Amino acid sequence: MMTIFTAPIVALLSLISCSTSRDEGPIITPPVPNVPVDKNWTFEAVPSWYDEFDYTGSASSAKWDYDLGGSGWGNNEKQNYTNSLENSRVGDGLLTITARKENSGGMAYSSTRLVTRNKLDVLYGRIEVKAKLPSGKGTWPAIWMLPTERAYGDWPKSGEIDIMEHVGYDKDNVHFTTHTEAYYFKINTQKSSTVKIPGASAAFHLYRVDWTPYAVRGYFDNQKVFEFVNEGTGYKVWPFDKKFHLLLNIAVGGDWGGAQGIDDAVFPQKFELDYVRYYKMIDK
């Protein structure tokens, strides 16, 4: 049977049809994160770069350089970094970084910050450092990594990996942390793990990072304490697809290290390092 619509009804149906079409619009499928697969990468058994500190004098210029100065380093730190043997010396199988209470470069303390920038710049791999930490209120030692080229912009956009941080007023609580634009401490989103290591300043312990395209994993004394997985959503979360270099230092005071003041009576303080080793990741 044929149904006949009058003109007003036809017009109304046409209006409803057009209105519905405009409201719905095209269907947009949200992008799917390109999350990498964990291929269970392994690392070479023999380090391709290392310093066993089996010599005497300054740290090897073939392997290390110095960051110098007393600008506060973005954290209101109180030390001046030098390349003096009074602040950094190799001997008796150890690298010893010493923070001192003295006038230096316009600052009230001196210390050293050693870097492998342009000596060891790596993309992925395992780094392990055997170290004994300084102690006392105001000390802030670190074993950490920064991007060499800053391809995604200034900090924190290009990332930071803190293999070990310790603040002296919080004795034996050792931290492993990563910072990115999406996850960093100034917006309280940092990815971090804190572990109690009794005697961190009395004995040597092993601090390690295993870095692959899938994750940054942290280990203290070969026990996994941290994992940050690549979400596959771009550099704001994962800038760890560019080359980074290693840093070793003692800061004095600063926003975190000096949060409970500085005890001048504890200085000089020593950060002793037995070895630093880098193992290449075996690609799959």
Image (spheres, rainbow, N blue to C red):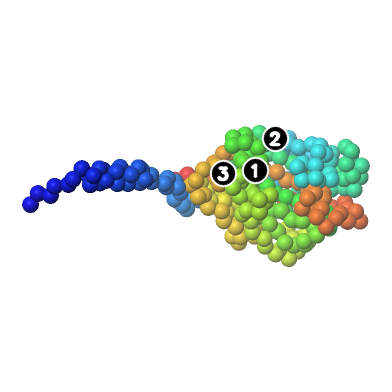
Q: Residue 279: horizontal and vertical position, in percent? A: 58, 46
Q: Is residue 56 left or right of residue 13?
A: right
Q: Which of 6 and 38 is in front in this view?
A: 6
Q: Residue 162: horizontal and vertical position, in percent? A: 66, 50
**The quadrant where residue 131 appears:** bottom right
Q: Residue at x 64, y 45 (%)?
A: 160
What is the secondary structure assignment of the residue under circle 2? loop
Label of residue 35 in the image: none
**The quadrant where residue 225 appears:** bottom right
Q: Give the mark nearest the N terminus, 1 or 2.
A: 2
Q: Nearer the viewer, residue 262 or 283?
A: 262
Q: How far apart are marks 1 and 2 (CA)?
A: 29 Å
Q: Residue at x 55, y 42 (%)?
A: 235
Residue occupied by mark 1: 156
Q: Nearer the viewer, mark 1 or mark 2?
A: 1
Q: How far apart are marks 2 and 3 (CA)?
A: 34 Å
Q: Residue at x 73, y 58 (%)?
A: 204
* Disc 1 residue type (three-letter): Pro
**The quadrant where residue 265 appears:** bottom right
What is the secondary structure assignment of the residue under circle 3? loop
Residue occupied by mark 3: 236
Q: Give the mark nearest the N terminus, 1 or 3.
A: 1
Residue occupied by mark 2: 62
| Label 2 CA crowd tier, 10 Å (few <14, some 14–19, many 20+) | few
Q: In this view, does 268 lie to the left or right of 4?
A: right
* Disc 3 residue type (three-letter): Lys
Q: Which of marks 2 and 3 is in front?
A: 3
